[in-house]
Image: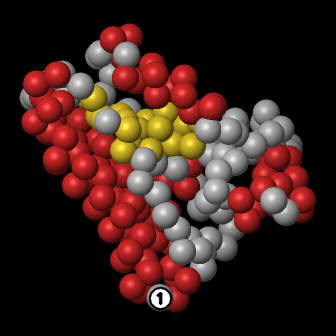
Amino acid sequence: VVNCAGISHGGSELTDVAKFVDVVDVNLNGMMRVAHAARPLLARSKGCIINIASMLSYLVEGKSNVVGYTASKTGVLGLTRALAHSFGEDGIRVNAISPGYHKTDMTKPLWSRPDSEALVRGRTALNRWGTTYDLVGYAVFLASPAAEYVTGTELPVDGGYVIGNVVF
């Protein structure tokens, strides 16, 4: 199961509690609902769950206005670890991937503007935005027999964004 729920209401998450709750319900509670529903089948097949978190799970950018998104994706990391431990008794592995800035419909307001596109690209060690294809290899690995002893972990796929451009 690739558990990839993700929505954001942008700045309104900070000022509208209902929108904050909506984001948390989809991004975090939705993942728990899927995991719970899939558990019996995954136990029979010794399958796995790959939760999609975010680099915002451990990095708050400047004056963050996506508080619901950040809180929910941080919760995904905790959920991943807790489910790995609980579902492990059934032979189910649970891991997470934390994408950085990837060109998706959700990030289009950023990458479609030359100023913000360049800002992200300039801070990313690989000097580019990610694509959804950049996530495929990690997902294939985590779902494969090569990762059959990997559970409760998180893999960042951010092109080196988090390490930034440190100047000494």
Residue at 40% x, 24% y: name it.
142
**Left or right placement of residue 164 versus residue 31 in this view:** right
Q: Position of residue 79 (x, y in %)?
A: 29, 49
User: For residue 51, which quarter of the picture?
Assistant: top left
Residue 30, can we see it?
A: yes
**Left or right placement of residue 70 versus residue 94 in this view:** right
Q: Position of residue 68 (x, y in %)?
A: 46, 71
Indicate the quadrant containing the C terminus: top left, top right, bottom left or bottom right. Answer: top right
Q: Position of residue 167 (x, y in %)?
A: 85, 45
For disc 1, the marked residue is 16
Residue at 24% x, 25% y: name it.
47
**Left or right placement of residue 20 versus residue 103 in this view:** left
User: For residue 90, which quarter of the picture?
Assistant: top left
- Neighbor class of circle 1 (other Cα within 10 Å; few <14, some 14-19, many 20+) is few
Residue 74, can we see it?
A: no
Question: What amino acid type should be assigned to the residue bearing mark 1?
Answer: Asp
Asked if residue 22 is positioned above or below residue 7 in the image, the reply reads below
